[in-house]
C-alpha cells in the first residue's frame, strides 16, 4: 500500500512538472543529471519489471518493450521497432508467475490508464511513457545478475562492471545479455 501511494504521488508530480524522477533514494546514480528523465538508486541489485502481455499490441509505439506471455511456456522479451523483435533469444516457462498476474477474464483493465513522465500528455500507448527529446531512462544497475536474488520474469537491468558493461533481460528462465559493440 505504501509503495502504491508513493507511485501515485510520483505520477501526480510527474504529470504536472517536466522534471527528473529518481526511484529508490533522493540521489540516484547519474553523474550527468541533465540527460536523465527517470533513474533508479545505485547499488540496490534490483531491476525494472516489464509489463507481461497475453496478446502483443497490434499498434505499439516504436520503442515499446514487454514480456510476451501469449504462450506461458514460451515467454520472451520483445521490443517494437515497426515489427516485434525478440531480445531474449530463448523461451521461458512463466506459467506460475503468470497465474499470479491479473487476467482480463478476471479483472477489467483500464486501457486508457498510463503514467507519463516528462510531459503533460502523450499519444504513445503504454503503461509508463517517458516523453523527452533530450532526456532518457537510466536503468537500474548491478555489477552482476548473480547479485539479484529471485529475479522476476521481464526484469531489465544494466550491468555496470569493468570490462562487461551490458544490458541484461530476464525472461523467467535465463538472463540474456546485450553488449554494445564500438
Image (cartoon, helix red, strand yellow):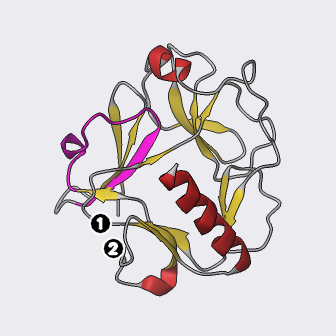
Asked whether disc 2 touches disc 1, contact meaning CB atoms under 8 Å apart, the reply is yes
Residue at horizontal 33 percent and vertical 73 percent from the top = 29
Q: Which residue is identified by label 2?
A: 29
Q: Is mark 1 on a helix, strand or loop?
A: loop
N-term-proximal mark, 2 vs 1: 2
Residue at horizontal 78 percent and vertical 73 percent from the top = 120
Image x and y of residue 4, in percent: 56, 52
- Direction from residue 94 to residue 81 in the image, left or right: right
Q: Which residue is at the front of the view, 82 or 182?
A: 82
Mark 1 Cα shell of 10 Å, populated few (<14), some (14-19), many (≥20): some
Residue at horizontal 75 percent and vertical 35 percent from the top = 57
Q: Does 153 appear in magenta? A: yes
Q: Is residue 109 above or below residue 127?
A: above
> Quick one: which residue is furthest to the left in this view?
162
Image x and y of residue 78, in percent: 56, 37
The magenta span reads 143-160
Q: In this view, does 130 lie above or below 66?
A: below
Picture quadrant of residue 175: top left
Mark 2 Cα shell of 10 Å, populated few (<14), some (14-19), many (≥20): some
Disc 2 to disc 1, C-alpha distance: 5 Å
Residue at horizontal 54 percent and vertical 78 percent from the top = 20
Q: Does 45 appear in magenta? A: no
Report how many numbered discs are placed on residues in the image.
2
Image x and y of residue 53, in percent: 64, 31
Q: Which residue is at the front of the view, 129 or 23?
A: 23
In what quadrant of the picture does the C terminus appear?
A: bottom left
Q: Which residue is at the front of the view, 70 or 105?
A: 105
Q: Which residue is identified by label 1?
A: 42
Q: Is residue 165 above or below residue 31?
A: above
Amino acid at each position: 500500500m505504501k509503495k502504491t501511494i508513493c507511485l501515485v504521488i510520483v505520477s501526480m508530480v510527474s504529470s504536472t512538472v517536466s522534471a527528473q524522477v529518481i526511484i529508490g533514494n533522493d540521489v540516484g546514480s547519474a553523474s550527468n543529471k541533465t540527460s536523465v528523465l527517470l533513474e533508479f538508486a545505485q547499488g540496490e541489485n534490483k531491476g525494472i519489471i516489464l509489463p507481461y502481455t497475453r496478446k502483443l499490441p497490434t499498434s505499439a509505439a516504436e520503442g515499446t518493450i514487454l514480456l510476451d506471455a501469449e504462450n506461458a511456456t514460451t515467454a520472451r522479451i520483445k521490443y517494437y521497432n515497426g515489427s516485434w523483435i525478440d531480445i531474449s533469444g530463448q523461451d521461458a516457462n512463466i506459467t506460475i508467475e503468470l497465474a499470479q498476474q491479473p487476467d482480463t477474464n478476471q479483472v477489467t483493465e483500464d486501457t486508457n490508464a498510463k503514467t507519463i513522465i516528462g510531459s503533460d500528455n502523450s499519444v504513445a500507448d503504454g503503461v509508463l511513457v517517458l516523453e523527452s527529446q533530450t532526456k532518457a531512462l537510466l536503468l537500474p544497475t548491478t555489477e552482476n545478475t548473480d547479485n539479484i536474488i529471485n529475479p522476476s520474469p521481464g526484469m531489465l537491468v544494466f550491468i555496470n562492471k569493468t570490462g562487461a558493461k551490458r544490458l541484461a533481460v530476464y525472461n523467467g528462465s535465463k538472463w540474456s545479455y546485450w553488449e554494445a559493440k564500438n
